[in-house]
Amino acid sequence: MGEGHFKEFEEEYLETMYEFYEKNPELSVRTGDIAKALGVSPASVTEMVQRLARNGFVNYEKYRGSSLTEVGLLRGRAMKRRHRIIESFLTDALHFQGDVHETACILEHAVNDDLELTFAKILNYPEANPDGKPIPMFLKTDDTNISDTDMLFSAATLEVGQKGEVVAFLLSKSEGDAIAELGVSIGSIMNKVTTDTWSIGDSELKMAAKLGIQILLRKC
């Protein structure tokens, strides 16, 4: 099997695990559930999940299930965004009459970042795909470099007294707008004051752990 095919399989797994994350960010996904979603054997899932864990995309515990690391979240989220943008482009721009979902599954591995962004611009940055499922926001501004993904962690994992720079959000548009109104944006420095309180500049912000999981930081 070529490396390109392996990469496609990895992306499919990360995208599928992101779907479970959308439903419950704190849930560890069972091997059997992934196998059912992808239509493959549990043994195949175990092999691939272990591979993804070695590459830093997945946290895996035998008999306990697996969850995406911050790096895995970024990749899975990006693939899900690309898939739903392609579905929207096929439907709304091309008026495609075939199987939109299956066609998007094929195209998402061939579309690059520039083409994806072009599709999004043509569609005026849609918030949902034709099925009404939310399209994740683009994570970074033009001057934000998040290539060093091994250095990223979620705000929820900060210890009291630690701080980090906000580099990405794993939020819907409405959630992103709400958090922006609280003064949190790309480049903000978040200091953890108590278990559920952060300071940002001269302001303090209380935040549930579920939301903190979806804010990615780089230590500073």
Image: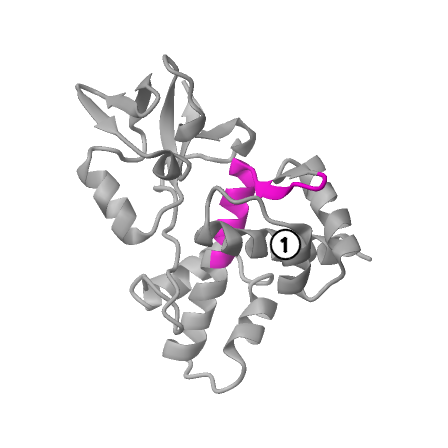
**Residue furthest toward the top?**
161
Q: Position of residue 74 (x, y in %)?
A: 50, 44
The answer to whether 102 appears left or right of 97 in the picture is right
Say which quarter of the image contains residue 63: top right
Number of marks in picture:
1
Q: Provide the residue designation for mark 1.
A: 13
**Residue furthest toward the front?**
63
218 versus 69 height, above or below: above
Q: Nearer the viewer, residue 136 or 210?
A: 210
173 versus 195 height, above or below: below
For image coordinates 49% across by 30% down, the residue present is: 152
For image coordinates 48% across by 41% down, the residue present is: 26
State the quadrant of the C terminus.
Answer: top left
Q: Position of residue 17 (x, y in %)?
A: 57, 52
Q: Position of residue 175 (x, y in %)?
A: 28, 47
Q: Position of residue 36 (x, y in %)?
A: 66, 63
Range of residues picked out in magenta: 62-80
Q: Nearer the viewer, residue 213 or 88?
A: 213
State the quadrant of the N terminus.
Answer: bottom right
126 versus 4 height, above or below: below
For image coordinates 40% across by 71% down, the residue present is: 88
Disc 1 marks a residue whose amino acid type is: Tyr
Queried whether the magenta region covers residue 68, the answer comes back as yes
For image coordinates 40% across by 40% down, the residue present is: 214
**Residue furthest toward the right?**
1
Say which quarter of the image contains residue 208: top left
Way the structure is coloured = one colour
Circle 1 packing at 10 Å, graded few (<14), some (14-19), many (20+), is many
Secondary structure category for the residue under label 1? helix
The answer to whether 138 appears left or right of 201 in the picture is right
Queried whether the magenta region covers residue 163, the answer comes back as no
